[in-house]
């Protein structure tokens, strides 16, 4: 059964581009506040994950609305979001490494060094969460929490020096804007993936980035078009495969950092076993790339079906009324 994506901003088809932009940013800003306390500890690893993703979504929204909101109007906020999300990155990577890498493999790798690896990872996670807490207590974050919602409330991007083209786009209805943007992002995915070298990590990473941009945009505009859940569902298999590939790359880099000063042969041997295990998983699912790619290519575009535009009554029936 297809599920509505989590954390969907309550935009609607009667909004202008500027109003929809503000709604998406405000929704994700509020989401950070809901998870801020949980992000201070790994007792609930969803906390730092949700904070980091919300910052990333907001950065993606700044990019998605770039043809209506010029870069110089959002550059300072983009820098803040990049730094704030970046401070959460090591903690999130270690959460994934421990909870989805080390713990599930306990007793499955016939190698010494498992307990030592868990201890080293735990020490680094403690330090990474201290970085998160310093960020949450920093003046930069406090200023962001105070000034960013004010900028949203007055739609500060529309008060400066804007070209007539930008003002026209901001005032226009969000539906045609969404259709054009989704088309553009989908073409980028198709262009990147059509002749991708599946054995080239850089190529597959580039495809993953383009898929993520399209996925975020599809979720931004989810309330506008019926059938978006089905389209997003067709992307899931492809993104899952690309996600495993990224996990392998992150694990390799993370182990290089964790073990930079280590000389314990058992610990180093166990690290090699971890990378080998995860790499094997990737190669097992890589064989399904063509099938998953074809599924995405053949997916219907709900944003161009006339019957797909969601009216107020259908949004209310599905629980999407803002």
Image (tube, rainbow, N blue to C red):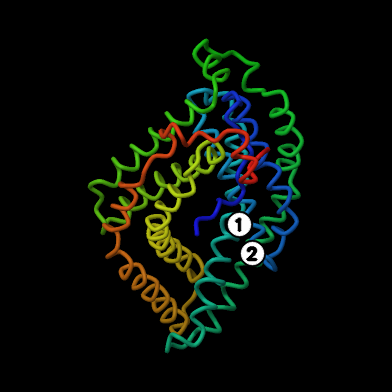
Residue 262 drawn above or below residue 206? below
Q: Is residue 130 above or below residue 83?
A: below
- Disc 2 target residue: 45
Counting from the top left corner in percent of width and height, residue 296 is at 34, 49
Residue 305 rendering spot, x and y as whole percentages:
41, 34
User: What secondary structure is marked by label 1?
Assistant: helix
Q: Quadrant of residue 11?
A: top right
Residue that appears at 35% across and 67% down? 282
Q: Residue at x 76, y 41 (%)?
A: 142
Image position, residue 242 (x, y; %): 38, 57
Looking at the image, residue 196 sits to the left or right of residue 160; the answer is left
CB-based contact (under 8 Å), mark 2 and mark 1 = yes
**CA separation, marks 2 and 1?**
7 Å
Q: Residue furthest top?
A: 164
Tell me where residue 288 sits by quadrant: bottom left
The residue that appears at 61% across and 57% down in the rendered structure is 49
Secondary structure, mark 2, is: loop
Camera-side residue of 280 and 24: 24
Q: Which mark is residue 93?
A: none
Residue holding disc 1: 49
């Amino acid at each position: 059964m297809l599920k509505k994506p989590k954390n969907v901003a309550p935009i609607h088809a009667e909004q202008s581009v500027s109003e929809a932009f503000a709604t998406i940013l405000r929704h994700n800003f509020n989401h950070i506040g809901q998870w801020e306390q949980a992000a201070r500890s790994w007792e609930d690893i969803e906390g730092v994950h949700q904070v980091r993703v919300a910052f990333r979504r907001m950065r993606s929204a700044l990019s998605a609305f770039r043809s209506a909101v010029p870069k110089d109007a959002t550059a300072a906020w983009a820098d803040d979001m990049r730094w704030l999300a970046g401070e959460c990155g090591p903690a999130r990577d270690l959460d994934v490494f421990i909870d989805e890498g080390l713990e599930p493999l306990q007793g499955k790798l016939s190698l010494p060094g498992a307990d030592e690896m868990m201890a080293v990872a735990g020490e680094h996670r403690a330090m990474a969460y201290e970085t998160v807490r310093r960020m949450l207590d920093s003046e930069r974050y406090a200023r962001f929490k105070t000034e960013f919602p004010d900028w949203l409330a007055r739609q500060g991007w529309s008060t400066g020096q804007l070209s007539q083209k930008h003002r026209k786009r901001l005032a226009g209805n969000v539906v045609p804007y969404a259709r054009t943007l989704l088309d553009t992002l989908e073409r980028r995915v198709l262009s990147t993936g059509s002749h991708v070298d599946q054995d080239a990590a850089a190529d597959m990473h580039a495809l993953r980035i383009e898929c993520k941009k399209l996925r975020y945009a599809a979720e931004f505009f989810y309330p506008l078009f019926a059938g978006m859940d089905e389209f997003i569902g067709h992307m899931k298999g492809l993104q899952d495969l690309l996600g495993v590939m990224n996990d392998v790359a992150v694990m390799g880099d993370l182990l290089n950092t964790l073990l930079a000063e280590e000389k314990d042969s058992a610990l180093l041997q166990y690290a090699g076993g971890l990378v080998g295990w995860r790499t094997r998983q990737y190669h097992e699912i890589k064989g399904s790339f063509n099938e998953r790619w074809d599924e995405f290519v053949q997916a219907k575009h709900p944003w161009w079906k006339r019957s797909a535009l969601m009216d107020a009554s259908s949004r209310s029936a599905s629980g999407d009324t803002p």
